[in-house]
Structures are given as C-alpha cells and as structure tokens.
Image (cartoon, rainbow, N blue to C red):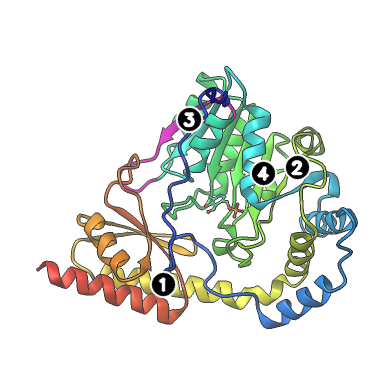
Amino acid sequence: MGKLKYRNKLADMPSYDVVERDWYIKVNANESGLNLPPLVEDRVMSRLSRVAFNRYPNEDLELLMEGIGRNFGLGVENVIIGNGSSEIIEKLFYCFGGRGRKIVFPQPSFSMYHIYAKAAEAEGVPVDLSTEDYSLDVKKYVETVNDNKASLCVICNPNNPTGNVMSIEDIEYIASHTNCAFLVDEAYIEFHGKSAVGLLKKYPNMIVARTFSKAYGLAACRCGYMLASAAICNMVSKSFMPYHMDVLTLVTADTVFQMRDEFVPRIQMVIAERKRMEGQYGTLAGFKVFPSNTNFIFLKYDKAQKLNEYLVERGIGIRSFGKAPLLENCLRISMGNREENDAVFKAVKAFVEEQD
Ligand SMILES: Cc1ncc(COP(=O)(O)O)c(C=O)c1O
C-alpha cells in the first residue's frame, strides 16, 4: 500500500491532551456539576418530542439567533451560532489565518489557541502573562499585536486556566490601540459578570465568543455563539458548512437561553463554593491559591504532579498541566457540588499530611 498523502504538517499537530476515564469525581473540564434544572429539562423534552427529524434545521437556528441578539440589543446579523464556542474560535482562526498571518494570544490561556493557529496555517504569537499573578501587560500585548501586524488578537476573560480577569478599561485599551480583529473569549463570563459586549458597537473589529457549556451546563450539546458587526458575521459565516447546527442542539440551547433565569441560583452557588474552597485550599501548607472569577480554582503547589497521580489513583480527575509553559506545578480544579468539593479537598489534604 502506498503512503497516504495527508495534509502537510498534519502529523505534527498536537492533540488536545486531556486524559478521560470513568472518574469517581470529575472536576477536570470546567463543566457544570449539575444536569439541567428539572423545569428546563421538561421543556426541552417536550420540544424535542415535536422535532421534524426529516427536515434540515432552519427556523430553529433563526429563533436562537434572534433570542440571543435581542438579549444584547443586537440583530440576527450580529450573531453566529457554533458547535460549542470551539467551532466559533476555530473558524475565526481560519478566517483570519492562513500562511504569513499572525495571531496573538496570551500564554498561559486556553490551550486550543495554539492548535487552531497551527491548523489555520497561521503563526501563533503568545504573549507571556506575568509569572507573579498571571496578569496581562496590555501595553506589551498591544505592541506585540502591532509590531507583528497581526490579523487577529485574542484574550480570554476570565482567563482559563488562571481564573483571573482583565478590566473593561484594559480591554478597551486593546480595542482602541489595535486595528486587527480582536476576539474576547468569554467562556466563563457568567461567573464574573463584567462583559465586553457593551464595547462591540464602539469597536467594530471586536468579537465576543460565549458558550452554553459552562454556566448553562450544556457541554453535551456543543453550543456556543459569537457576537460581532454584521460585516464580520457575514464573512465568517462563509466558513461554515450548510446546516452546521443540528436541531436537537438548537432546540435545547434555545430553551436553556429562554429559561436562563433558572440558572442564576446555581451560578451563585458555584461562586459561593469557589470562594469557600479557595479559603480551604489556602489553609494547606505550600499551596498558592490564585484569585479566580470562574467556576474553577487555580493552584500552585510544589508536588502538584505527585498530588495529581495520587488523586488519579483515587478516581478523582482534576487538571494538571505537566510542563506547559508557565504552568509548572499548577493545578485547576472545577467546582462540583458541595459534597464533591469536600471529597476532593479531603483527598488533597490527606496527601499533604502524608508529606510531612
Ligand atoms: C476559554 C475557553 N474557551 C472556549 C472553550 C470551548 O468551550 P465549548 O466549545 O464547549 O463552548 C473552553 C472550554 O473549556 C474554554 O475554556
């Protein structure tokens, strides 16, 4: 058999390196620890029972785009729905990428930015966050964007995996000092509340990406969206295949969006749990707890690697970053329900006490 002619450099592409298994407690992917609220689930099931499976999805997409647009004072022409915000981000990298193009993003941040830049045959240009507190030096960031004549720059606010936030003033500083497309990834914004969406009308190069996978507990459905000027949406829409969203996801996401008030108490619960757990981990010898504005906590501990192995042996899945740049000895633990958070902490504490 002859050698297959895969696309150039495909073999060198890194994979998304999360090890999954049947965890006893799964707090490694920043999902919601709770399934849909029962009232929402009932409504979803009742709508799904009326789906026309024989038809390509059409009005369900429009309905969701309208609902989302209206909520932000925008029109359908300002909204694109994707299979998770992952698809949106990948398409944006594709649309602004290509050979000779540069895409700037912070490091450490969402690990897929590197991979999407490679997939788009663009050059990813990381800007290192401060080693002290993982803040972004916006002046340095803007200089990097402009010196490299980047076609796209990205920030993640709040940032994954470090959990910290940028002020709206800093985001506006970037928007007003660059002239390329500027993506603000707001995957965790519901846990912070201070969105950059309000800047979209003033800065037509800005794009905001959001997801249903985190605060709205819809990771299984794969649904996200972006908000931007009609001109950007029009161009980026060209990169999607026809009928790219399936009707089951659209109907479910639309119901969740209409009933989003049902999610407010659980978002508050996650925030309260995060604060409680940050306090608890702060009491452990050798732990540095970074302030987070998300549904996860971010820690540094000398024996992070060994601790992670200890937890894996006990069926507890957290996120350890191995040798990723600027993330040595760092761990990210998503917030589950109170019992899960207590169980994870108990196991971590037992490990720490064994070290003395
Ligand atoms: C910062 C950030 N952006 C985007 C995503 C993609 O989420 P999804 O594709 O589920 O919408 C994630 C997922 O973990 C994330 O952490």
SS at circle 4:
helix
**Of the residues shown, which amino acid type is indicated by label 1?**
Ile
Quadrant, the C terminus: bottom left
Establish if 137 lies above or below 56: above
Q: Which residue is mark 2?
A: 201
Q: CA distance from mark 4 to mark 3?
A: 24 Å
For the stretch drawn in magenta, what is the main secondary structure?
loop
Q: Which residues are magenta?
A: 120-134
**Extreme-left residue of the structure:** 356
Establish if 127 lies above or below 22: above
Q: Residue at x 74, y 42 (%)?
A: 228
Q: Which residue is mark 3?
A: 11
Cβ atoms at labels 2 and 3 below 8 Å apart: no
**Of the residues shown, which amino acid type is indicated by label 4?**
Ile
SS at circle 1:
strand
| Coordinates of residue 62 in the picture (x, y in percent) | 87, 54
In this image, 333 relative to 314: left or right? right
| Coordinates of residue 30 in the picture (x, y in percent) | 49, 61
Quadrant, the N terminus: top right
Q: Which residue is mark 1?
A: 25
Cβ atoms at labels 2 and 4 below 8 Å apart: no
Query: Disc 2 or 3, which lies upstream in sequence?
Result: 3
In this image, 139 relative to 46: left or right? left
